[in-house]
Image (tube, rainbow, N blue to C red):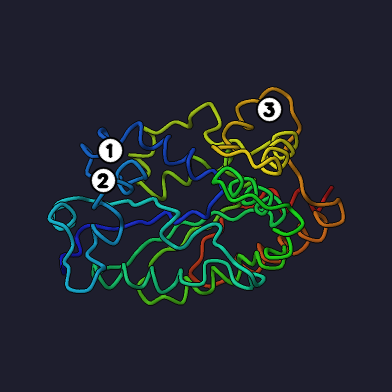
Amino acid sequence: MTDTACSFAFHIGAHKTATSHLQRSIQTQAAALSARGVHWFGPDQLRKPRQSVPALLGLTAGQAPSEEIASLFKAAGRVVFSEENYIGALNTPRRRPVTCRYPDASQRISAVAQAIDRKIDVFLAVRRPTAFLNAAYCQQLIGGVVTRMAHYRNINPPGSVDWHDLVLRLRAVPGVGEMVVWCHEDYATHFGGICAGLLGASAAQMVKPLDRYIHRSLSAAAVAEVLHRHALREGGDLGFAARRMLPVEDGYPPFDGFSPADHAAGDAAYRRQITAIGAVPGVTLLDPHWARDSMRA
């Protein structure tokens, strides 16, 4: 695949950084974007049978990119993928503490660049470490893997969330072109700019942010309910049921498994990471309002 007229962007997440909200907001305009030469592939497309990122791009040994992708790269102006699961799982079964988040991310992005034979513009959102881990823990409960937060924290210490390290590894991939990073805490502020980077300024004007949350996390009461029912050996989708019964939207306080001191330490590390990310050559860090404002508080 040697034609270079078409550019390629890949929004890789990370998980729990409003990825679903961004994806669904853009998905509403997918047909109109296609008419403008911007072809969008989000979860609705990439999670169908035989339409995963590896399947479409021919990343399995002996395979070639699908005819659909090959034809788009010859005719389209821009192809955009958004799939946070591609760089690795949010939670995986572990017995030892995590020391590196998304350890295979750079190899997987390199494989994409080699398959399509062109530069990849990479888009990544990052999030406060303690908030990220709270959300990841709740997602694990929703997924049916029930453990107590104390155990989860032992396996997933806040120090394992090092976004600067991830950015450095991705930026070092020869196939990466533009790299854009933003803070989850500033997502609403930068929504238009994120879409403009992904889709192009003109096409981005068609996309408006949905006026609702997509996947709210669990309330503290919902987490307690899941743990209680699990202890009683009840089966079924405990996390989903508890989220419906005790939702944050109804005023139940969100779950928080960290102390104020934990948050303060995590936020200090996060600010250092953001500062370091902004200094990485070839990385565009969208104005980090949260980091600047939190230092003033």
Evaluate if marks 1 and 2 touch, with contact meaning CB atoms under 8 Å apart: yes
Query: Which residue is located at x 66 percent, y 67 percent?
Result: 160
Give the x, y percent position of residue 39: 26, 45
Give the x, y percent position of residue 58. Answer: 22, 65
Residue 84 versus residue 193 in the image, above or below: below
Inter-mark Cα distance, 3 to 2 = 39 Å
For residue 195, side relative to residue 264 (left or right): left
Dot 2 alpha-carbon crowd within 10 angstroms: few under 14, some 14 to 19, many 20 or more = many
Q: Earlier in the sequence, mark 1 or mark 2?
A: 1
Quarter where residue 128 is shown: bottom right
Q: Quadrant of residue 243?
A: top right
Q: Which residue is mark 3?
A: 246
Q: Amino acid at mark 1?
A: Leu
| Rendered image: mark on residue 39 | 2
User: What residue is shown at x 66% (from left), y 37% (from top)?
Assistant: 218
In the picture shown, does residue 60 fall above or below 123? Answer: below
